[in-house]
Amino acid sequence: METNSNLEDAAAGDARAALAAIGSARSSAADRLVTPWWYHPILGLLAAVFVVVYTTGDIVAVLIVTVVYFAGLGILMGVYKEKTGMWINGLRAGRATWWTIPLVVIMVACMGGAYYLHAVHGLDWPAWVAGAIVFAAVNFFGLRFDIALRAQLRKTP
């Protein structure tokens, strides 16, 4: 008959093996999550056009660009998922989410500020500046998010 000590040793060994398998799966996922070089520039372009048109366009232009923007996001997500085998929501990515939050804040602030300047003062150029800032922010924060996510997955659970 086995003693409690033997059962505990076997359970501990099983737990270590399970943790090792989880770590290996996470590392494998991190290796697969390599964003194509064109992903962030296209995402940034979609976001920049959305900001510019939302800020300065009429309702028809805004509706068309909104459809194109969300269709583009869906296509990018689908291609990424097909390439890597998975999709991770930037707002539900653990510690890597901290790279998504400033991006959202920058996008909303740029859009709000440019919209205000256009609506109150009739200025169009702030929309173009806002679009350029959003494009740069998507590329900067997107790359940082990718690096943080892969590092987080490789980290031992």
Image (cartoon, rainbow, N blue to C red):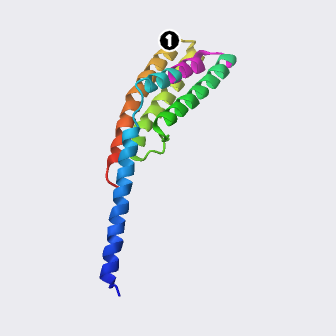
Which range of residues does the magenta coloring cover? Answer: 47-59
Query: In this rendering, does residue 29 appear at all?
Result: yes
Q: Amino acid at mark 1?
A: Trp
Residue at 66% of width from left, 20% of height from top? 64
Residue at 51% of width from left, 30% of height from top? 108
Residue ranking furthest to the bottom: 1
**In the rendering, at what x and y percent does residue 2 appear?**
34, 84
Residue ranking furthest to the right: 60
Query: In this rendering, does residue 116 appear at all?
Result: no
**In the rendering, at what x and y percent does residue 125 appear?**
50, 11
Residue at 45% of width from left, 18% of height from top? 132
Residue 70 occupies which quadrant of the picture? top right
Q: Nearer the viewer, residue 16 or 126?
A: 16
Identify the main secondary structure in magenta. Answer: helix
Compared to 120, does 112 lie above or below?
below
Residue at 53% of width from left, 29% of height from top? 76
User: With 109 as the anchor, is 140 left or right in this view?
Assistant: left
Q: Nearer the viewer, residue 83 or 62?
A: 83
Question: What quarter of the picture does the N terminus occupy?
Answer: bottom left
